[in-house]
Amino acid sequence: MGSLMSEESGGISRDGKVEALVVGAGPAGLAAAEVLSAGGLSVVVVDAMPSVGRKFLMAGKSGLNLTKDEAEAAFLARFGDGAEASRGAIEAFGPEAVQDWARGLGEEIFTGTTGRVFPRAMKASPLLRRWMGRLAELGVEVRTRWRWTGWDGAKFVFSTPDGEVRISADVAVMALGGGSWARLGSDGVWAEVFATDGIDCRGFEASNAGLLVDWSDHMAGAFGTPVKGTALRAGEVLTRGEWVISKRGMEGGGVYEVTRAVREGAALTVDLVPEWSVEEVTLKLERPRGKMSVSNYLRKALGLSSVQRALLMEWARPLPEGADLAALVKAVPVPVAGLFPLDEAISTAGGVAWEALDGFMLRARPGVFVAGEMLDWDAPTGGYLITGCLATGRAAAAQALAYRAA
């Protein structure tokens, strides 16, 4: 097919030109398309998958956590050492703005007891349908099964069902995702192309991932059991989120929040009774044990559930007594064998190095901007990831509009 397009190509001219090109139709790419089209540009969005927003839809299967309703300083702190550009993007489109945006799409939202914000419908599909409807009204054109394979000079090269296509754009926003959930389109292959082009990228690492634990046989009966009422600590990170014992280890929101610290070498401990101090636990353990079994004694003295007792026995036998046992109950050491494989992680750390960017624009390719998980930032789940993708997509598009107008 080469560089020529048909008469019916809409936003793409016959000679393969478009005002604004968005590569990747996840939340970052769609957010960029919304800003670019509202800014008066003709926008074409392309995606390698047969339909848009596949990872976004998967995220919504267990409840689409759009953002976290908390103070701006606390929210920004969860993005760690990300560049000032990402912080500025989130300051411009943070939790309150995300909620207003969702309401503007006709989605009723609610805030849970932990501050996490969800659509009332919980699923992602109703919001995505309304969002795509808005983009269609703005004139945004969407092409699926278009896989970006690299550049030919300044042109973007795509493999499409009709053959190879070359597109030139006044401005482009790339939002191709990180390196996890390849089957949903986020395979990270773009990083190899970037490296060939001399663009500095940090290697991908699992983030918001399960932790591998080599369980003994006696834990098999607990597989699939949710663990409630505990706290996980890794370095300076403390979370009281629920998690699940699985055949391979530990999974769930509470675990995901400590992934980064564990990945960076911090030891992991479980506090089985986070509501009590060591001193309070010590006092409770002064109760005479009598003829009770150790397990029954811990149940009666501390109210430990069967799964909490199993974890203590799994990781801390032989049990000490008195104050030493109290200290152990408050910090049971977890022998983590590693993280779940990269492709199974909720998200990835790594990506385009901030040093390779001027704001969100590639220094090596003026007029080309990147957003979302392509960026080297590492945010936890709990609404931070989706907000970060929406915010950086919008910020990259705003910078693209300013670049084109200059």
Image: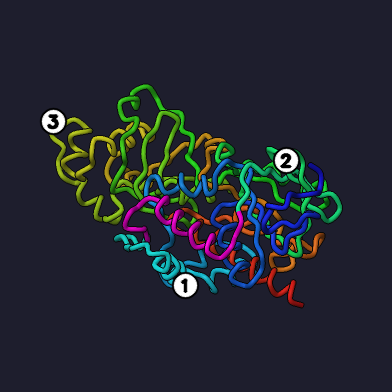
Instruction: Give how far apart the Cα atoms at labels 2 and 1 are.
Output: 42 Å
Mark 1: give few (<14), some (14-19) or many (20+) Cα within 10 Å. Answer: some
Task: Give whichever of discs 2 and 1 has the lower sequence position.
Answer: 1
Residue closer to the observer: 76 or 121: 121
Element at label 1? helix
Residue underneath mark 2: 159
Instruction: Give how far apart the Cα atoms at labels 3 and 1 are.
Output: 54 Å
Q: Residue reaching furthest bottom?
A: 406
107 above or below 121? Answer: below
Figure label count:
3
For the residue marked with disc 3, what is the amino acid?
Lys
The image position of residue 214, as x and y in percent, is: 46, 28
Q: Residue at x 72, y 56 (%)?
A: 12
Instruction: Give how far apart the Cα atoms at labels 3 and 2 are.
Output: 73 Å
Q: Which residues are magenta?
A: 117-141
Q: Is residue 226 left or right of 260 when viewed as pictured?
A: left
